[in-house]
Amino acid sequence: MESVQLLAIDKNETYSEKVYRQLKQLIVTNQIKPGEALNERELADSLAVSRTPVRDALRTLEQEGWIAKKGKQKVISLLTWKTVQELLEIRLPLELMSYDLAIKKITDRDIEVLQRLTDEMCVTTKEVNPAEYYELMTKDIECHIQIARISKNTKVIQMISDLGDQLIRTSVLSLQYGDLPIEEYPSRHMHLLECLRKKEYDVGRETLIKHIATWEEHLRKIPNILKVDHEENLIF
């Protein structure tokens, strides 16, 4: 981790939560490499905190699957092409189900929440670097999870929420390896929001399909770019 610059902890923040969020961002944006071992003492020294909040953060990340045990060490979990393929198979049907239910139940308050998230996406596109990729894709997926919440179907909410972190991780990859200008991401969400606001069912569905198709298209380029020739091989 010599090349990774960790930010000092703001003393007004909860230490464990801050360490957790920062490490997760570094993992998702590939600044800490898959398979790389994590050293509690080094992390604590870099962040100017005790080892306790670092240990708590690593425990949470391990429970979520971002970190795995390798002997006595904790290492960053690997992302395989098989995992991505499974996401490609299920995301669109889930998203369309969520949208179909949400458009019947959406309220003015729901629109306000989605508008705020979309506005935050626009702000995030001002600077383009790995940290902004993470922040932008986090807001992107948060919008999709919010639409699931509007559906008020607990099964749909749970399924899409459970996929949230993997969708963020693959969306960062999609942005890195794709050719869609970063400004287009909030623009597409604005269009989807307008469809929900006006209850334009068919146009909204087409917009959602196009949005997810872009994510799929970019991800499908990666095996050739990185020469992945087997479903168990790593993307990163």
Image: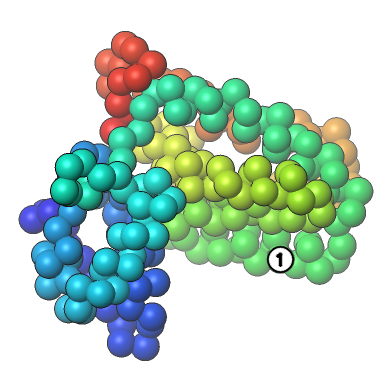
Relative to 228, residue 55 above or below = below
Q: Quadrant of residue 95?
A: top right
Farthest-out residue, bottom: 12
List the single residue furthest toward the left. 2
Residue depicted at 56% across the width and 43% down the height: 163
Quarter of the rendering occupied by the C terminus: top left
Q: On the image, numbered disc 1 is attached to which residue?
A: 113
| Quadrant of the rendering where the N terminus is positioned | bottom left
Colour approach in the figure: rainbow
**Which residue is pictured at 12% across the width and 67% down the height?**
41
Q: Position of residue 92 (x, y in %)?
A: 67, 30
In the image, taking residue 95 as reference, residue 81 lies left or right, namely left
* Whether residue 223 is visible: no
Q: Residue at x 86, y 56 (%)?
A: 106
- Label 1 neighbour load within 10 Å: few <14, some 14-19, many 20+: some
Towards the viewer: 165 or 183: 165
Between 213 and 152, the one nearer to me in the picture:
152
Helix, strand or loop under label 1: helix
Percent from the top left, x then y, of residue 147?
73, 51
Residue 21 placement, left or right of 39: right
Position of residue 100 relative to residue 38, above or below, is: above
The residue drawn where x is 48% and y is 48% is: 165
Q: What percent of the width, then of the height, locates residue 40? A: 17, 63
Name the quadrant containing residue 61. bottom left
* Callout 1 amino acid: Val
Rendered image quadrant of residue 13: bottom left
The total number of labels drawn is 1
Q: Residue furthest top?
A: 229
Q: Nearer the viewer, residue 207 or 90?
A: 90
Q: Is residue 76 left or right of residue 156?
A: left
Residue 232, horizontal then vertical, whole percent: 35, 19
